Image (cartoon, rainbow, N blue to C red):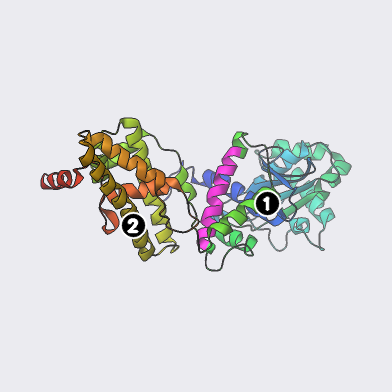
Amino acid sequence: MASGAPQHSAAGQALGYLHQCMWALVELGRRAPDPATQLRLECLDDIQFDASGTPEELLQTKHHIGSSSGSLTPSSTDLWRTLNVWMDLQSCEDLLLRLVTTQKIPSNSPLRGLRSGADRDTAGALSALVKAAEESRSSTSAPWRQKFIKMGIDGQEELIGKIVIDDNSTQASDFDKDLTRTFRFAIPVGKEPVFTHLIKGWWAGISVQLLAGNLEAITGNDLVLQVNDIADQLKHDTLPVDPQVMQDYDESIVDTYKDRPFVQQLLWIAFENNRLWKAIRDYHRAYSQRSFWLRHQLLAEAELDRYAFKLHDEWEQIFDASMASMSHSGRTDAELVGQEILAELTKTCRARVRERFDEQWFNRGMLHALADGELGQRIGWHPEFEKKLEALLIHV
């Protein structure tokens, strides 16, 4: 067996779906100046744009990987598969039908007459398609070609007159360039990579909702609001939330961190399982989030150090006050005191990594990071956490 990609790899199909979803984002971005424009996925076609509730434009997307893209000709199966879908549509004079494909139309092909522009030649393209319908020997496209022939000249002319072909379109792996060009006026200078990451993360969630039917459509105004929100998150006094950080987690995440010092600290104050795994989730999200900021150079290590110092200072005030109160009142319920310290700190903590970044899960997660000994600080909840940590380290 030859080396290379597996014969039954689904990579091509997966990239096709990615191409469809990302192309929909690019197209909606180009139409965003019209806030009422509505986009739907997998309704009448791969991508559908409505105006005032009426379908206005349908797009079919065809994706081929790299050098296997080949050429789009009048006999291409992709083309006839698309025509088969469009031939089933009810007649609509104002409906635009677009084929967006990574394949390229040869320079001498009559199909170039279906490109947009002043040099359109639908008659020449139709003649080539009729000839291909009659002479092609492809068994795959045979029923579609026969359907086209049965339409007659009037039906064929009406159909072909509505079609625009956008060939040689962007490969799925290169969409960042298209997104940067589309949203260039909204992207802060030097923030192009992180902007495209954030807009794609948001759009991935929107695409799933559209395809699942949980969201009927999305408008140009929805996109404008999101773009403005991302641009705002990239300002100097706040920070963006990585969409990947906000995914759902369950209790299985406990296994990854069960031996960490911050988890032991929570066990020392008798944290039950439900609260324990949620605390671990906060830690994991905070760790992933600050890694994202550092990776994209949105935050300096020195800023994190200053933030950690502020957290430690607030913890110290509450911890010392709790120890004094515990001593004066003669309390012996150390575990409950530890829970109260943690609860008070997470409730009243005013420290912020940036002035307008106010995500409480991040603060909670960073408190657990300090309880783990990260960023040069060490805090704890149990009144005797220092002795317990010393004993823990001795037995490691």
Q: Is residue 67 magenta?
A: no
Distance, label 2 to label 1, CA atoms, is: 42 Å
Estimate the x, y position of residue 54 in percent, counting from the top left: 80, 40
Residue 120 visible in the shown view: yes
The kind of residue on which mark 2 rests is Ala
Q: Residue 6 — which label?
A: none
Q: Position of residue 105 (x, y in %)?
A: 68, 58
Highlighted range, magenta: 193-209
Sort mark 2 into few (<14), some (14-19) or many (20+) by Cα contacts within 10 Å: many
Most foreground residue, 105 or 11: 11
Q: Which residue is mark 2?
A: 308
Q: Residue furthest right?
A: 154
Secondary element at image label 1: helix
In this figure, which residue is indicated by the disc labeled 1?
28
Q: Is residue 96 left or right of residue 236?
A: right
- When the figure is inspected, residue 47 is found, relative to residue 357, above or below; the finding is above
